Image (cartoon, grey):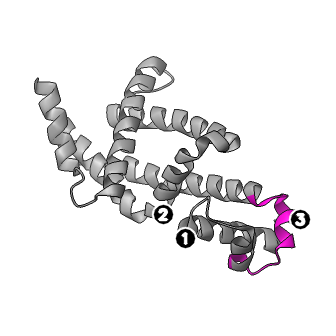
Amino acid sequence: MGRNREDLLAGAKRCLIEKGYTRTTARDIANAAGVSLAAIGYHFGSKETLLNEALFESMKEWGESLEVALTSETDQDATPMERFETVWRRVMDTFEELRPLWVTQFEIVGQIDHLPEIRAHLAAGLQAARLGLAEVFSQIDPAAEPERARVLGSFYQAMLSGLLMQWLVDPASAPTARDVADAMSMIAGS
């Protein structure tokens, strides 16, 4: 990959973090990359193609970071509810660490009707995320129990999205991992 192309991708990622998807201009990217505006057309054809590639790369990196957080070893002597709380705490730790990417994803979801290429990519990512969440939280092998993994994974994805939205809007009063574990205990006891 040419140096200008790499610089453009890095510049586009910076712009996604600093300005978001819809507010980033081609000139912003070129300036962040330290290349000419014409380089975008030469290497990517359009600003949208470049931003989409930068977004997809950023989401892949985010997914890898989240996977590490979710699959880090937990205390084997912990109860299932303690392990549940530990995993949610790790997920919530990524909220601050990856805040700009989370914000950009919510921005894009608000514009999804105008971004069909991104919709398809996000839909595929959601499918994989659901199965991964079911595997991590419920130790379900998606290949062996695809429907159970889909249903539970969808529930965990809904929790993740809802917790994230609350944290982005009002982090001071958003539920903690302990709150989530307590709520699950209350639901299970009812």
Q: Is residue 58 left or right of residue 183?
A: right
* Contact check, label 2 and label 1, Cβ < 8 Å: yes
Label whose residue precedes the other's in the sequence (2 or 1): 1
Q: Label 1 is placed on what type of residue?
A: Glu
Q: Is residue 143 left or right of residue 93?
A: right
Q: Label 2 is placed on what type of residue?
A: Pro
Tell which tag, 1 or 3, sits nearer the viewer: 1
Q: Most prominent secondary structure in the magenta stretch?
A: helix
Which region is colored magenta? 32-47
Q: Which residue matches tag 3? A: 42
Q: Is residue 88 left or right of residue 120?
A: left
Place of residue 173 in the rendered image (x, y in percent of width and height, measured from the top left): 21, 56
> Can you tell which quarter of the image residue 172 is in?
bottom left
Residue 159 belongs to magenta span = no
Q: Secondary structure at mark 1?
A: helix
Q: Which residue matches tag 1? A: 18
Q: Which residue matches tag 2? A: 100
Q: Label 3 is placed on what type of residue?
A: Tyr
Q: Secondary structure at mark 3?
A: helix
Q: Is residue 38 left or right of residue 148?
A: right
Q: Indicate whether 138 appears above or below 166.
A: above
Quarter of the image containing the N terminus?
Answer: bottom right
